[in-house]
Image: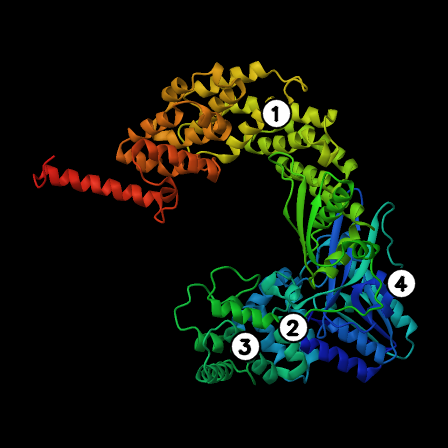
Amino acid sequence: MAVIFLGVRHHSPACARLVADTIHAVRPAYVLVEGPADMNHRMDELLLGHELPIAVHTGYRDHERRHSSWTPLCDYSPEWAALTAGREAGAELRFIDLPAWHPALAGLHNRYADAEARYNEATGRLCRAFAVDNVDALWDHLFEIEPADGLAERLATYFDLVRGDTETGPDDTAREAYMAQWVRAAAGEAGERPVVVVTGGFHRPALVRLAEQGERTWPEVPRPPEGATVGSYLVPYSFRRLDAFDGYQSGMPSPGYYQDLWEYGPDGAARRLTEAVTSRLRARRQPVSTADLIAARATADGIALMRGHPCPARVDVLDGLATALVGEAIETPLPWASRGPLQAGHHPVVVEMIAALSGDRKGRLHPSTPLPPLVHAVLAELGGPGDERLHLDEQAGRERSRFLHRLRVLGIPGVVRTSGPRPAGGTELVERWTLTETDDRLPALIEAGGYGVDPQEAAASVLAGRIRDADLDQLAGALFDAALCGIGELAGQVLDDLARAVVAAADLGSLGRTLTVTLAMWRHDDLFATRNSATLGAVVRAATLRALWLAEGVLGGPVPADPQRIGAMAAVRDALRHAGPPLGLDVDAALALADRVAACQDAPPDLRGASLGLGWSLRGAAAVDPVRAVRGAFVPASAGDWLAGLFALAREEVLQAGGMLELLDELVAAMGDHDFLVALPALRQAFGYFPPRERHLIATRLVELRSGASAWDLMRLEAAPELVAAGMALDERVDAALRREGLITP
């Protein structure tokens, strides 16, 4: 009995042809394939007649770990060729690798992730020897465009060379020992008929050695740990998700090109790639002439000849197209000269070339394919495309909102909220959503099915995963999402973590965002059913006290205004205003602290302004002399930053205080040209805290002070204010020079 080991590169047309030809020639008793052994009893489901690419998606969760992974297959995957050819030859089909949830694969999100990073030294030496840029070009050079004669021997030599004496880690060792046991058992059962083993080339040398010794009994399929939840389902996949230029970790980039290579051979693939690039460019109104195409093909043929290729390979065609279609100098290296996702900054023609290489094929499951319960639960309730307006003060509106928020948390495409409650601001009782049809929805729903059987359970699982190792901002976001999803038990867990995190918080901005979220939930019972919650109130109180303590410790000279720091002081103001007495907050002590910060010259200007605004907004105009306070604190060098803090916390008080706008106009007008130019960006930021209607009111009152011009016209100046100010400063310098030289009289 013979065991034929075929080491392959995943998603390789040359390897897929070799596998299919070998199986048809020897008609083995067993075909063993690197893949999840727990899918063996579902082999008929896998071979139903889907439109590839598809993938086996596995979701795993327990109280310590959550993991998702994919086993993708396309027409030219050697594993798929092994399954289909083996079924045609009447062989027994078996996946022989550990299940995707197994700890040995915990570090892999893709079973067919490229293993060649483990032997970069060997492949690097080969790339230098054959004068190619990277391992993808090396692979094409050695295997994809070369004649098929002797391919099995060349592959075996290649993988023996690149693995060499590499020491495998415990994960690969466990996988190879498990796969070898399947090989020994199949060999013992096959009698005189051969066994074909198809695995990644990295594993082949070890399996050849391990298959000669050890037990010949069929291995057991590992079972998940008690309390763990595991689900594996077929999902439609796409060429875009298979493409290394989009971040996929497989060995083969450009799946659209390799699909053509599989179907039409090297010459046909080169021709179709040129046609695809031309079509994409012309569709975007980029001129591509017949002469350009002739030049590209001639250049590609010449490059192929120079590189010793019997016909143009992928990089030959790409280099020819780039030479013919890109007329100017290219600042960044061409993306096919390296590996990994496409980076920003490439020429638009090059970007279109990469898109043409990728292709736009999307898989489709056979109608009889089992789907997880979550899919049925969502599709039964989701409804058709359109816009929805939900009234959150009605029970039906709240229930629909929670359902849609659960889908949003799960990342289901085509479910977008356009307006509704936000962590900051008052309660908003109307929510708007836009639902659209998308081909990506079904795969996303199937993959989300690994988190739970219904939207509530699945969303709770996702949010629980976000909580793990989350920082203060992420915890606050998870709390708000949990409330929007109506997942009360999770909110309780987040609150416990928040309470611990707040006590140790060191960043005022993050603490302020957390306070904003928790205060909104504590106040608004109609939305969250958490009004006056004792646990939530404890978090609000602790966050307020911690924020005040941090604010008094912030020191530093004039620095740009920090919107997050200012927002934290605004959150403190709202907590003192709306929750002070109920939560036992000492408002008088807080105001005394704000006075100290406002008067501290070592504190940043924006924090001093915000502290003044805090006291002004809580005490009211009757208890404050705003004109005296502003005149005493106004410093030209940091005026904009200081005003940003003041306006953010006391915007309404500034507008209502008599003579305040006139005072600010006086102070700004007294600034020298240089000081004004330096302060202008910060001044613009400060006045940005006023909404448009109030900015128009301010402009109207200031224009009335100075001239009869239209405030509306002033607000709609097309020139940037900085440019206008710079022009005025230049005019002043010119006038000064002319007066100095006696060319004009004062």
* Apparent side of residue 258 relative to residue 552 in the rendered image (left or right): right
Check disc 2 and report the residue beneath it.
158
Check disc 3 and report the residue beneath it.
279
Q: Earlier in the sequence, mark 3 or mark 4?
A: 4
State the separation of the CA atoms marked 4 and 2: 30 Å
Secondary structure, mark 2, is: helix
Q: Amino acid at mark 1?
A: Ala
* Apparent side of residue 671 relative to residue 563 in the rendered image (left or right): left
Q: Residues within 10 Å of mark 4 (few under 14, many from 20)?
A: some
Q: Amino acid at mark 2?
A: Tyr
Check disc 1 and report the residue beneath it.
575
Check disc 4 and report the residue beneath it.
215
Of discs 2 and 3, which sits in the foreground? Answer: 3
Of discs 4 and 1, which sits in the foreground? Answer: 1
Q: Earlier in the sequence, mark 2 or mark 1?
A: 2
Residue 340 percent across, percent down from the top left? 57, 62
- Kindly indicate whether the residue at mark 1 contacts the one at mark 3 (C-beta within 8 angstroms): no
Q: Earlier in the sequence, mark 4 or mark 1?
A: 4
